[in-house]
Amino acid sequence: MAFVNSLVSWFMLKRLHQIELFLKYPADVQQEWFNALITKARDTEWGEKYDYRSIENYEIFRERIPLNRYEDLKPYIDRMLTGEQNILWPTQIKWFSKSSGTTSSKSKIIPVSQEALEECHYNGGKDMLSIFLQLYPDTNIFSGRQLAMGGSHQISEINNETILVGDVSAILINHLPAWAELLRVPGQDIALMDEWEAKIEKMAQTTKDHNVVSISGVPSWMLLLLNRILEITGKSNIKEVWPELSVFFHGGVNFAPYEQQYKAIIPGDMIYIETYNASEGFFGIQDQKESKDLLLMLDYGIFYEFIPMDEMEKENPKAIPLWEVEKEVNYAMVITTNAGLWRYLIGDTIKFTCLSPYRIRISGRTKNFINSVGEELMVENSDEAILQACNKTGAIVSEYTAAPIYFSNEENGGHEWIIEFSKAPENLEYFTEIMDNALKAVNSDYEAKRYHNMILRPPKVHAAPEGTFYQWLKNRKKLGGQNKVPRLSNNREIIGEILELLHQ
């Protein structure tokens, strides 16, 4: 352990110095990465198509290169999956991250280069640890094991080359250095299992007797594992299983709806550190004790652009670089990466809460909202309303989703909610009223549409039995850490499927 402590201390000091540089010169750092990415990719098929050699500045890049969704890049990625190289990125691509996001029924396959692994994902992990140690220098994090909840992967042989496709967490676990592997549980044979229900069981059985001091993963799936461990051990809370557990590094979904559930099973002192990492890259890390806002990481081989949400409906929405953003504006995030994602719309929306340094808050998804009558309801609104309703009623929400009720000849529109409670409120109508009032307080557009019930009637809420959303994911063959329950949808496809489950 002494060797590990020394190695981590060296990494920490080195990375903290580099973080200081991009905090001091953010625009310069982003401009350097822009130049480096354009230069490196100029002889790829993509670079030759758009004549990267003649791109002299960002303005030319913005005018010449189209904004791309996954469907736009998929034909190139499909060729890369067959072993073709130098298509979107010049170095060999043999790893692909599988990401389904929240609303798509099909998986996205994202290329992962060696540069993306080292400069982005691994630096993100090192910086998360470095920032945490700076905030909590007296931590016990090296006194025991770290439980990491990874995904699964499949290996294919194409043209005598090994192509690995899996969750980004599985790719990272598969390439961890030996010193990091010494601290982690469970072993790779369990961590990379494909069958999710069997993996949860194996993880619970093999980790319950270790001295686990930190956990990391997606809150929804980690909660499933922790509850299974309580069932197996017969303990009343996780601190009885792991007395030294002190920190949860989490990301993937907003933690607020899960906070009450974690406090219920992990009593006493517990630190929660939020991160913003995805298959496409590692973007942000919580760097303050008192705030969940995320420091935007600027030196990971990613060039950022941002599209104001009121531009997204236009035929040719205009993106802006980091140095032109404003606080408290909803932006769709666009990334250009060191794995060949060019002007890629990741699907997330963010707000800047601070411009020096650049800190962000994830506000939702570009496809994960309700705007049936101009109410522009975002996930950050619904999460906040759910939290307020829970605080005032003592309820604990496991999962939820909502969708519009469309206007008809007989009735005006509305919103329909399905909420799964791990602790139900005594009065669902009172819970609904608190939630509705909270939505009015945090979203003036929603408040205006709810005025005297003229456009939107009061929300319609269904309390779902425990396990409903898990069964929905299972029916869709979407069990696993990369799969998330969609909070909001602007159509009724998902809520219709879940309502069918409720009526069976």
Image: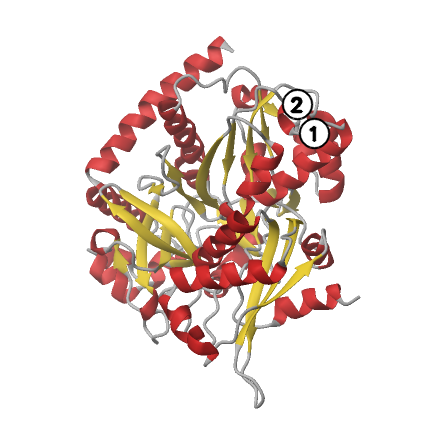
Residue picked out by circle 2: 240
**Neighbour class for label 1 at 10 Å: few (<14), some, many (≥20)?**
some
Q: Are marks 1 and 2 in contact (CB under 8 Å)?
A: yes
| Spot occupied by residue 124 in the image (x, y as percentages of width and height) | 42, 35
Badge count: 2
Find numbered disc 2 in the image and state the secondary structure of the residue it sits on: helix
Question: Is 491 situated above or below 18?
Answer: below
Give the residue at the far bottom of this rendering. Answer: 409
What number is the disc on residue 72? none
- Residue 235 is left or right of residue 367, and the answer is right
Towards the viewer: 254 or 503: 503
- Residue 404 is left or right of residue 494, and the answer is left
| Spot occupied by residue 414 in the image (x, y as percentages of width and height) | 53, 75
What number is the disc on residue 236? 1
Quarter of the image for the C terminus: give it: bottom right
Residue 476, image quadrant: bottom right
Q: How is the image coloured?
A: secondary structure
- Residue drawn at the location 51% of the way across and 59% of the way down: 435
Towards the viewer: 454 or 85: 454
Question: Is 20 situated above or below 472?
Answer: above
Instruction: Identify which amino acid the numbered label 1 is placed on.
Output: Ser
Towards the viewer: 61 or 354: 354
Instruction: Identify which amino acid the numbered label 2 is placed on.
Output: Glu
- Residue drawn at the location 56% of the way across and 44% of the way down: 258
- Residue 322 is left or right of residue 396, and the answer is left
Residue 234, image quadrant: top right
- Residue 284 is left or right of residue 394, and the answer is left
| Spot occupied by residue 73 in the image (x, y as percentages of width and height) | 47, 61
Find numbered disc 1 in the image and state the secondary structure of the residue it sits on: loop
